[in-house]
Amino acid sequence: MSADETLRRAKAMRSEMTQPERELWTALRAHRFNGVKFSRQVVVGPYILDFAARSRKLVIEVDGDSHAGNEARDERRTAWLEEQGYHVIRFSNADVMRNMEGVLFVVEEALRAAPLPTLSPQGEGFSR
C-alpha cells in the first residue's frame, strides 16, 4: 500500500471511531492525560494507529471483534512498530467500556516507562 493510499484511508477513518475509541479519546485528547499529547488515527509506515503519543513513542490500540482470528497480523504489526522504537499496548473494546480506570492506569504506567523527549542542549544549533 502506498503512503498516499494509507493517508486516504486514515482521513476516511477519522470520522468513524467506535464507542470505545470515543471514550478513550475523551480521556486522552487535548493534553488531558498527564499533559502528554496524543493523536488519533496516526499514520506510521504502512499502519494507521488508533492513538499515539509520538513524543513518548507510545501506541495505544483498541481492538474490537474484527481482530479475533487476526492475532498473527497484530503480532507482525506490533513487531514492526517496536522495531521503529514504539511501545504498543492493546486493549479490547470490553476493557475500555468496562474498566476505563484500569485502562488509564496501564497507559499511565506505560508513560512512566516511556523515554522522555530528548531536547538539544541549549545553544546547540540555535542562533540568536
Image (tube, grey):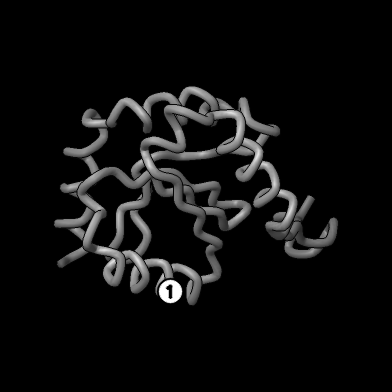
Position of 81 compared to 118: left or right?
left
Total numbered badges shown on the rendered structure: 1
Say which amino acid is labelled 1.
Ala
Using the image as rendered, state which of residue 79 and residue 93 is in the foreground: 93
Residue lying at 37% horizontally and 70% vertically, measured from the top left: 75
Image quadrant where one finds the N terminus = bottom left
Residue 68 lies, with reference to residue 95, above or below; the image says below
Rendering coords of residue 118 (x, y %):
73, 60
Using the image as rendered, state which of residue 120 and residue 15 is in the foreground: 15
Q: Secondary structure at mark 1?
A: helix
Rendered image quadrant of residue 50: top left
Residue 4 lies, with reference to residue 1, above or below; the image says above
Q: Which residue is mark 1?
A: 79
Residue 89 lies, with reference to residue 32, above or below; the image says below
The residue furthest right is 122
The 10 Å Cα crowd at callout 1, few under 14, some 14 to 19, many 20 or more, is some
Residue lying at 34% horizontally and 73% vertically, measured from the top left: 76
Position of 57 compared to 23: left or right?
right
Residue 104 lies, with reference to residue 52, above or below; the image says above
Residue lying at 17% horizontally and 38% vertically, measured from the top left: 12
Using the image as rendered, state which of residue 4 and residue 78 is in the foreground: 78
Rendering coords of residue 55 (x, y %):
61, 52
Residue lying at 79% horizontally and 50% vertically, measured from the top left: 128
Rendering coords of residue 41 (x, y %):
34, 43
